[in-house]
Image (tube, rainbow, N blue to C red):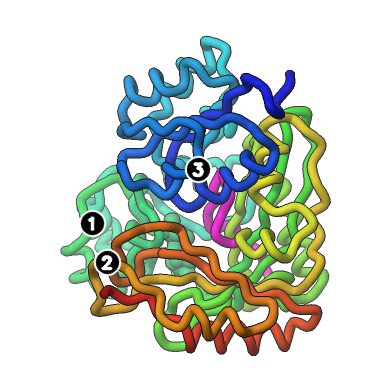
Amino acid sequence: MHFFSSDFKLGILGGGQLGKMLLYETRKWDIQTKVMDASPEAPCKISCNKFVQGDLMDFDAVYNFGKDVDVLTIEIENVNIDALEKLEDEGIKVYPPSRALRTIQNKAKQKLFYTDHDIPTVPFTRFAYTSEIEDSIQNGGVQLPFVWKSAQFGYDGQGVKIVRHLDDLKNLPNVECIAERLVDFKNELAVIVARNTSGEVRTYPVVEMEFHPEANQVEYVICPARIDEAVAEKAQKVALKVSEHLNHVGLLAVELFQTQEDAILVNEVAPRPHNSGHYSIEASYTNQFEQHIRAILDLPLGKTDSKLAGIMVNLVGSEGHTGDVVYENMEAILQMDGVTPHIYGKKQTRPFRKMGHVTIVDENMARAREVAQKVKETINVVSR
Ligand code: ADP
């Protein structure tokens, strides 16, 4: 099949920043695209060939959108999977495959998949309703403290809550959920695995999330992770195992905990380009978005090594600011060497909304880390 400068059409479900960055690559290779998103102001709107406004969870909307594309992919996992299955049955190539998506979309199913396949993960109990947890605690089942996670539709920490007292359960929605052991981890790591339809596989280097010591928010994604080689190898091995058993096609970002004893446990996976791979646009031989396209079109996968040390800083809306966005001190960060800001194109900011990111590259990791801190202290995402 000819993909480049041809009639081939790639469909993308979701029109946010991940889709927008995927479209830099389809533009680079002159691949025709069609994108669907619920918001008429989706960041993808200006760079795709055709934009369709529609609800990603609606069967008809997804089915009708997918009928006339050659390959269909996603940039968010909350999409109507029944529609994807029907499209697959009718011969449309859907990557990631609907089966893998179905396992991933529900956190309880995802966790059972890990235990079924002997993939190390944090011990958990599954509940049909949050209201059943109290009984379990009283009967000596679940122990406090634990981490409550809604099985479906969690995103960016919203479906996750640390429960320390019985009272904390009161404010949680009464939905299907899991209660997971609270891990005292040394590091949060991530590995992106790329797999094409022929089964060729490549992993990116292990990255590390560095947290703010008080706010408990990820401040920096650092590549390569500052960990022992043996731990990095173990993390990559576990990530490969997940990708293989899922029969995944495309990118799979595997989020991991490194425990105090250096065990590696899978936290969760995302079947698409991921925040933890944004550094690759500036730092890698093949960035994650190009790699995703190579994988789903069954092209040879690109080299995943880094050319330089890379650090990514998320640009999130400042607290106390809601409304039309302004990026303060952009000129100041643009004066720093090796600094590239990415602005996603969301018109409205609100506290903690992901509005963009900044990548810092340098031959020297310690220097990159210093510059990253300066960037973080300098730039502000506020409202007008
Ligand atoms: P989301 O899907 O919202 O990203 P995650 O499952 O990744 O949810 O959880 C968000 C964050 O909460 C993690 O990055 C980690 O910092 C923390 N977390 C999640 N599970 C646990 C756990 N079992 N023990 C300790 N911290 C956890």
Q: Is residue 35 positioned above or below 18 on the image? A: above
Return the x and y of residue 324 as percentages of the image width and height: 27, 66
Q: Which mark is residue 324?
A: 2
Mark 1 vs mark 3: in front: 3
Closer to the chain start, of discs 1 and 3, is 3
Q: Which residue is mark 1?
A: 135
Residue at screen point 62% across, 67% down:
189
Disc 1 to disc 2, how far (Cα)? 47 Å
Mark 1 vs mark 2: in front: 2
Residue type at mark 1 is: Asp
Return the x and y of residue 145 as percentages of the image width and height: 36, 72
Do callouts 1 and 2 mark residues in contact (Cβ within 8 Å)? no
Residue type at mark 2 is: Asp
Closer to the chain start, of discs 1 and 2, is 1
Determine crowd level at label 2: few under 14, some 14-19, many 20+ residues with C-alpha closer than 10 A.
few
Q: Is residue 222 positioned above or below 108 on the image? A: below
Disc 1 to disc 3, how far (Cα)? 52 Å
Q: Is residue 325 positioned above or below 365 on the image? A: above
Q: Which residue is mark 3?
A: 47
Question: Quadrant where the C terminus lies?
Answer: bottom left
Count every numbered label the image shows and give the total. Answer: 3
Closer to the chain start, of discs 2 and 3, is 3
Q: Is mark 2 within 8 Å of ligand 1?
A: no
Residue at screen point 38% across, 75% down:
381
Question: Quadrant where the N terminus lies?
Answer: top right
Q: Secondary structure at mark 1?
A: helix
Residue toward you, 155 or 103: 155
257 on left or right of 124: right
Return the x and y of residue 109 as percentages of the image width and height: 46, 40
In the image, which residues are magenta?
Answer: 263-276
